[in-house]
Image (tube, rainbow, N blue to C red):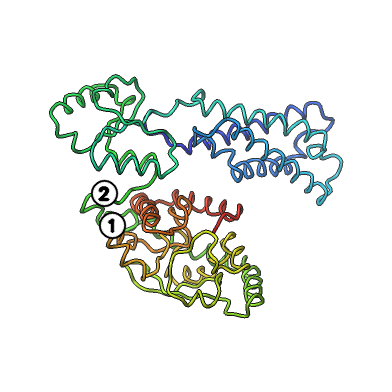
């Protein structure tokens, strides 16, 4: 009950969408003179478009954020359906399939897609209201002092999946399950509080879970705020990636080499075109080479396509802010599409970087950040990445507070590294590129 994986809802919803598409196509085929079998290729394409665009435009993401109004859910389903209809119409004009392929006929699409959108909206509403799978438990914080203040700030800073209730322990025992109760460390030493905790522990553990504020944040927000972490915390040998004979570590390096090489070959025309546009704008150098801190703090040189004016690139480094006047016109679009990062694929091939990992930071910033943010040095315990958990979950760092937020995601990645998490980061990076939401 208590620790539900929110992505399970997304997979369940995608399964219902696929089931609905197949069922409605079979139903329509019953009234057609030709069977469904010759339409399979187009049915697969339609399923790919509907699920893929639904993911891109956030019709599945609304399942994670229950605070979003139902109107937003319906709008995203509608946008997905309309764009799928336009895409299928364009593909029909380009491919010009024979008349026997009735699945792409306008009359079929007018009947199929609205029905599918209504089906999708229905299941999303039911999933959000806990009809199909149990509703998530209430999250309750029982703490005091600095710990409560830090947890509250962390919860407000991160878009939460569930609201956080702050209650006294004597009030929690009256709250019906299901619920997850995060109890602060100082309260666990109080005799009166221990008696109340014993009452909660006597409940069905499937319905009431007792945990710590740090564990609650890790599971619900998927980050580890450095100011809540004890000293010492997480030794280097304890990292999942440093286990002896780690198959996932070896697989990660092999995937880095194969994918980086394939991406370099596939995107080489884009890189050449971007280089030409950069040079035409101001006749300056097309590449930007900069020193960064890598694995265990070892320095290396990172390669990027230049997106700022030459004078700015050579000036003392400082954080990039929204609307930064140093960014060139070409650089603005390169940043939005993340194309300026493509030359770093050479760093991946050389072993300086990985495709997924904490972003390498400027050495000029790191000394000050290490003094102000606990556990900052630990982000060097994994090879830096082209993309990472902090990149897909947090905005660009433009201050010490932003750097602390990003570090909390990097620390979560260090502790929970897995190929599955790397795949999630990869797909979310692809979504960022497709939506041109870089900065």
Please report the residue visible at 81 percent of the width from the left and 46 percent of the height from the top.
92
Please report the residue visible at 39 percent of the width from the left and 39 percent of the height from the top.
220
Residues at discs 1 and 2 in contact (Cβ within 8 Å): yes
Which corner quadrant holds the N terminus?
top left
Q: Which residue is mark 2?
A: 229
Please report the residue visible at 27 percent of the width from the left and 58 percent of the height from the top.
236
Rendered location of residue 255, percent (x, y): 48, 60
Label 1: few (<14), some or many (≥20) within 10 Å? Answer: many
Q: Is residue 168 above or below residue 400?
A: above
Which corner quadrant holds the C terminus?
bottom right
Q: Secondary structure at mark 1?
A: loop
Please report the residue visible at 29 percent of the width from the left and 41 percent of the height from the top.
149
Q: Which mark is residue 375?
A: 1
Q: Secondary structure at mark 2?
A: loop
Q: Residue furthest left?
A: 191
In the drawing, does residue 376 fall left or right of residue 7?
A: left
Rendered location of residue 80, percent (x, y): 66, 40
Q: Is residue 325 above or below residue 142?
A: below
Q: Earlier in the sequence, mark 1 or mark 2?
A: 2
Q: Residue furthest right?
A: 99
Rendered location of residue 235, percent (x, y): 24, 56
Res 245 quadrant in image: bottom left
Q: Which mark is residue 102?
A: none
Label 2: few (<14), some or many (≥20) within 10 Å? Answer: few
Rendered location of residue 306, percent (x, y): 55, 72
Res 104 quadrant in image: top right
Q: CA distance from mark 1 to mark 2?
A: 8 Å
Q: Nearer the viewer, residue 8 or 278?
A: 278
Mark count: 2
């Amino acid at each position: 009950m208590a620790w539900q994986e929110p992505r399970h809802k997304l997979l369940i919803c995608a399964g219902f969408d696929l089931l609905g598409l197949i069922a409605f196509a079979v139903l329509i085929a019953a009234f057609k003179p030709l069977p469904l079998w010759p339409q399979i290729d187009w049915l697969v394409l339609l399923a790919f478009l509907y699920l893929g665009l639904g993911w891109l435009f956030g019709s599945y993401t609304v399942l994670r954020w229950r605070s979003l109004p139902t109107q937003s859910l319906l709008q995203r389903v509608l946008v997905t359906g309309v764009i799928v209809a336009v895409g299928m119409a364009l593909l029909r004009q380009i491919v010009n399939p024979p008349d026997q392929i009735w699945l792409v006929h306008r009359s079929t699409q007018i009947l199929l897609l609205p029905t599918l959108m209504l089906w999708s909206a229905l299941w999303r509403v039911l999933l959000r209201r806990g009809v199909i799978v149990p509703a998530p438990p209430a999250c309750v914080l029982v703490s005091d002092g600095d710990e409560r203040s830090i947890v509250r700030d962390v919860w407000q800073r991160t878009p939460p999946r569930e609201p956080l209730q702050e209650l006294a322990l004597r009030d929690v025992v009256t709250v019906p399950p299901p619920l997850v109760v995060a109890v602060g460390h100082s309260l666990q030493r109080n005799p009166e509080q221990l008696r109340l905790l014993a009452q909660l522990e006597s409940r069905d553990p499937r319905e009431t879970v007792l945990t710590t504020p740090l564990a609650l944040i890790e599971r619900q927000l998927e980050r580890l705020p450095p100011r809540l972490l004890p000293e010492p915390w997480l030794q280097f040998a304890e990292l999942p990636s440093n286990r002896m004979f780690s198959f996932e570590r070896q697989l990660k390096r092999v995937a880095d080499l194969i994918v980086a090489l394939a991406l370099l070959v596939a995107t080489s025309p884009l890189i050449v075109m971007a280089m030409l546009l950069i040079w035409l704008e101001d006749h300056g150098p097309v590449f930007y080479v900069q020193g960064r801190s890598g694995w265990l703090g070892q320095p290396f040189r990172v390669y990027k396509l230049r997106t700022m004016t030459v004078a700015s690139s050579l000036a003392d480094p400082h954080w990039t802010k929204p609307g930064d006047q140093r960014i060139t016109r070409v650089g603005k679009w390169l940043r939005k599409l993340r194309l300026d990062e493509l030359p770093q694929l050479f760093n991946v091939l050389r072993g300086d970087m990985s495709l997924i990992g904490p972003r390498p930071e400027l050495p000029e910033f790191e000394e000050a950040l290490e003094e102000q943010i606990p556990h900052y040095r630990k982000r060097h315990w994994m090879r830096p990445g082209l993309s990472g958990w902090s990149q897909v979950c947090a905005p660009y760092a433009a201050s010490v507070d932003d750097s602390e937020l990003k570090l909390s995601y990097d620390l979560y990645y260090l502790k929970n590294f897995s190929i599955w998490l790397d795949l999630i980061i990869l797909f979310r990076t692809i979504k960022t590129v497709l939506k041109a939401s870089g900065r």
